[in-house]
Amino acid sequence: MARDSAREKPGWGWGFAYDPWIGDAFNQGPIDDINLWSMWEAIRRPTLVLRGAHSDLLPREVAKEMTRRGPKAMLVEFPGVGHAPALLNEDQVSPVREFLLS
């Protein structure tokens, strides 16, 4: 995880390979007034939804609804994982590979 989450920054050492403030918007509380279902339902391509079983951002009920609406996505849920699976081990990479090759 450290190898994939850090980059050498020329001239000043090492730093994050991602935006360390990416979650700051969520510190202001839940975002209840945004409805993105119309955008989801406009998708017409095969879609794969990856969900960590312990996600606090994508409730299981919403992920299940994503399999019934719009592109009727295939849902893969990873036990023991938070919101975003890191895709750093074969158990998590394999479903993505299989989806892309199907």
Image (cartoon, rainbow, N blue to C red):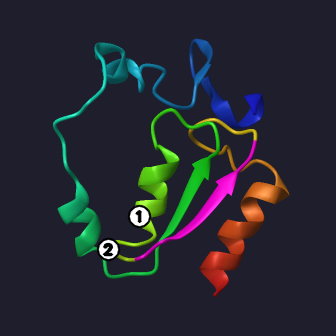
Name the residue: 70% across, 77% down. Answer: 98
* x then y, percent, for residue 39: 22, 63
Q: Nearer the viewer, residue 3 or 79?
A: 79
Mark 2 in CB contact with mark 1 (< 8 angstroms)? yes
Q: Mark 2: which secondary structure?
A: loop
The magenta stretch spans which residues?
A: 72-79
84 lies left or right of 45: right
Classify 85 as above or below 43.
Answer: above
Per the model, the C-alpha gap separating discs 2 and 1 is 7 Å
Q: Main secondary structure of the magenta part?
A: strand
Name the residue: 67% across, 43% down. Answer: 86
Q: Which corner quadrant holds the N terminus?
A: top right
Q: Is residue 74 magenta?
A: yes
Classify 80 as above or below 29.
Answer: below
Residue 92, quarter of the rendered image:
bottom right
* x then y, percent, for residue 99: 63, 77
Q: Which mark is residue 66?
A: 1
Please give the residue where the numbered disc 2 appears in the rendered image: 70
